[in-house]
Image (cartoon, grey):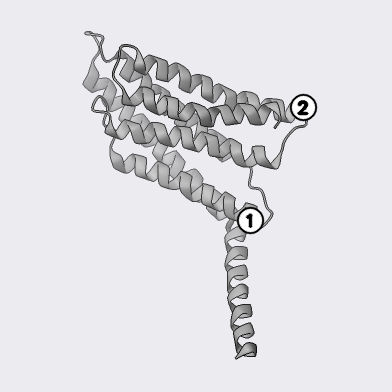
């Protein structure tokens, strides 16, 4: 495994540590979670840059890189729903996570047909918006214990930001599905063809 893929893998390994930091309560846990998240997302930039500059772009990397992002970011949003300090509206997170699973399923479907769907410009902008939103939530959580901090005002701002991110995430998901509709059609045709072949085989043996 080359270095860019190892960096991608490190993001996956950081996810359970990140989730743990959000699920416990000790002084500085949110700050540590913020630093870990930013470092993990920094590897997203580094691994892609290294892979392209070194000519080490691999099929594994093209599949693993967006998957690692989705798992880490989706885990963050899911945890935010249950945190009493922020309590993000669940419906926003459901839209984000559903979109991520749908696009991951599309990528796996395409990979099964021998086609790789790499992260495009829309996907990269979507990831940037999600990183900003998650970082904003974590920063809000870090500042909660400042007596002068206006919790309600900034919580509303954070939720508006997450709402904008949700809209962008949903729109980019629709774009990906429309752009790669051919993969879905090919899969449906293959499944239909496989079913017809099976029926013909049964008719012959019957």
* Residue at 39 percent of width and 35 percent of height: 164
- Percent position of residue 121, x then y: 60, 38
Residue 88, quarter of the rendered image = top left
Q: CA distance from mark 1 to mark 2?
A: 27 Å
Q: Residue at x 24, y 21 (%)?
A: 153
Q: Is residue 105 above or below residue 138?
A: below
* Marks 1 and 2, the one that precedes in the sequence: 2
| Total marks in image | 2
Q: Is residue 146 left or right of residue 38?
A: left
- Please name whichever residue, 185 or 6, is drawn nearer the observer in this view of the structure: 6
Q: Which residue has dot 1 on it? A: 112
Disc 1 crowd, CA 10 A, few/some/many (<14, 14-19, 20+): few
- Quadrant including the C terminus: bottom right
Residue 54 badge: 2
- Residue 120 in sight in this render: no
Dot 2 falls on a residue whose secondary structure is loop
Up/down of 80 relative to 33, above or below: below
């Amino acid at each position: 495994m080359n270095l860019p893929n190892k960096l991608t893998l490190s993001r996956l390994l950081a996810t359970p540590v990140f989730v743990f930091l959000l699920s416990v309560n000790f002084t500085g846990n949110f700050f540590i979670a913020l630093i870990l998240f930013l470092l993990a997302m920094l590897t997203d930039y580094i691994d892609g840059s290294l892979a392209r500059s070194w000519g080490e772009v691999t099929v594994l990397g093209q599949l693993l890189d967006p998957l690692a992002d989705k798992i880490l970011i989706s885990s963050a949003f899911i945890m935010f729903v249950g945190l009493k300090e922020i309590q993000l509206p669940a419906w926003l997170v459901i839209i984000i996570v559903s979109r991520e699973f749908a696009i991951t399923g599309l990528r796996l479907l395409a990979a099964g047909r021998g086609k790789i769907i790499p992260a495009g410009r829309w996907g990269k902008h979507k990831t940037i918006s999600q990183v900003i939103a998650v970082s904003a939530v974590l920063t809000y959580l870090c500042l909660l214990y400042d007596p002068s901090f206006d919790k309600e005002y900034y919580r509303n701002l954070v939720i508006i930001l997450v709402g904008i991110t949700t809209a962008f995430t949903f729109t980019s998901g629709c774009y990906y599905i429309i752009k790669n509709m051919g993969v879905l059609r090919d899969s449906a045709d293959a499944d239909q063809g496989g079913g017809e072949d099976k029926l013909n085989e049964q008719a012959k043996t019957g």
